[in-house]
Image: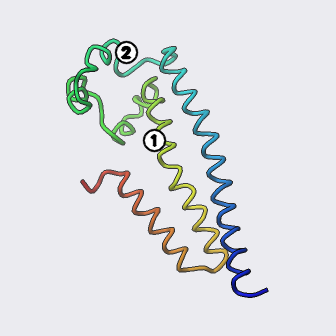
Amino acid sequence: MNDKEKNTDKIDQVQLVYARVLEMVSHVGMAFLALGYVVYVLQLLPLSVPIDAIAGNWHLKASEMQQKLHTPAGWSILSSSGALFKGDVVSYLSIYYLAMATVVCLAFASVTFYREKNYLYTTIAVLQVLVLLVAASGLIH
């Protein structure tokens, strides 16, 4: 087996791991989205912002609506444990979950790179995970 065939095997293994993780995360994410939608529309949990308040302020920009309705922005929604049991927050969390799918896939890919002793790609994947987490955190504006 020559070097080119060895590299192809390694790339294929990482691609397979990434694809398996992405498939799992995607299926769980779609179920989570459907659950969030059902909980929100059927109001199975109390809402932090009533639907009629959203409909009445639909003409506003998102930032203006947020200020007027006193809703948390971004990840700050997770700062209150009581907020996690609101119907609209469950819907938001499903979207946050799907947005983090790339981070999860890259984390698993970095482990695979490490097991293959490909330290350069391990470093690159870990750095990508860190950059995405910092960007998602909102620490840097």
Residue 97 point in image, percent of width and height: 50, 42
Q: Quadrant of residue 63?
A: top left
Disc 2 to disc 1, C-alpha distance:
21 Å
Q: Identify the residue at horizontal 32%, vertical 15% (top origin).
A: 55
Q: Which residue sits furthest bottom?
A: 2
Residue 73 point in image, percent of width and height: 30, 37
Identify the residue under disc 1.
96
Q: Identify the residue at horizontal 47%, vertical 36% (top origin).
A: 93
Quadrant of the frame with the N terminus: bottom right
- For this view, does 62 lie left or right of residue 47? left
Q: Identify the residue at horizontal 35%, vertical 51% (top origin).
A: 137
Q: Which residue sits furthest right?
A: 1
Q: Identify the residue at horizontal 24%, vertical 53% (top origin).
A: 141
Looking at the rendered structure, the kind of residue marked 1 is: Tyr
- For this view, does 37 lie left or right of residue 53? right
Which dot marks residue 34?
none
SS for dot 1:
helix
Q: Tag count in the figure? A: 2
- For this view, does 88 lie left or right of residue 56? right
Identify the residue under disc 2.
51
Looking at the rendered structure, the kind of residue marked 2 is: Ile
Label 1: how many residues lie within 10 Å, few (<14), some (14-19) or many (20+)?
some
Of marks 2 and 1, which one's residue comes earlier in the chain? 2
- Asked if the residues shown at circle 2 and circle 1 are in contact, with their CB atoms under 8 angstroms apart, the answer is no
The chosen color scheme is: rainbow
Residue 91 point in image, percent of width and height: 47, 29
Label 2: how many residues lie within 10 Å, few (<14), some (14-19) or many (20+)?
few
Residue 109 point in image, percent of width and height: 60, 64
SS for dot 2:
helix
